[in-house]
Image (cartoon, rainbow, N blue to C red):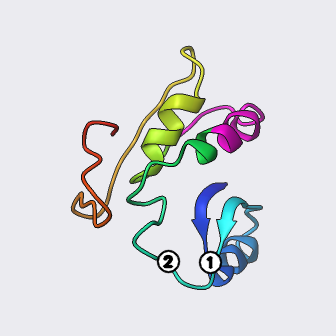
Amino acid sequence: MLAGDAIPPGLALAARYGFAADAFQVSVLVNPRSLQWTPEPLFADWLGPVRARRPGARPHGGGLVGGGTAVPPHVPLVASEHNQMSWPGGDHTAQA
């Protein structure tokens, strides 16, 4: 499991169910600059080599921007969002 943003209880929950999670950044609180809403080139740079060890990609929310730039052309990319798309730190529709 890969996470752009993670909180310690989320990592613990994943581990409790047997999922090792690699996280780009871990913080106690999620803020408006969260990767859920904000494209971050450093995340894409981190994601490329980490994702290369995984067979597929399914980015969520703002992570689809990093996922789209880090996934090779031959790897299927499926993105989804369970919330209403919103950009509290500025509109990133074009990047998405």
- The disc at residue 89 is none
Which segment is the magenta one?
Answer: 45-57
- The disc at residue 30 is 2
In the rendered image, residue 32, in percent from the top left (x then y), is placed at 39, 72
- The disc at residue 7 is 1
Q: Are marks 1 and 2 in contact (CB under 8 Å)?
A: yes
**Given the image, on which type of amino acid does mark 2 rest?**
Val
Give the quadrant of the C terminus: top left
Instruction: State the residue at coordinates (32%, 63%).
Output: 89
- Using a 10 Å C-alpha cutoff, classify the residue at mark 2 as few (fewer than 14 neighbours), some (14 to 19) or many (20 or more): few
Taking 58 as reference, is 46 left or right? right
Taking 40 as reference, is 2 left or right? right
Secondary structure state at the residue bearing disc 2: loop
Secondary structure state at the residue bearing disc 1: loop
Q: Residue furthest top?
A: 74
**Given the image, on which type of amino acid does mark 1 rest?**
Ile
Name the residue nearer the viewer: 51 or 62.
62
Distance in Å between CA atoms under marks 1 and 2: 8 Å
Q: Is residue 83 above or below residue 16?
A: above
Answer whether residue 48 is magenta in the image: yes
In the rendered image, residue 14, in percent from the top left (x then y), is placed at 68, 71
Which of discs 1 and 2 lies nearer the camera? The answer is 2
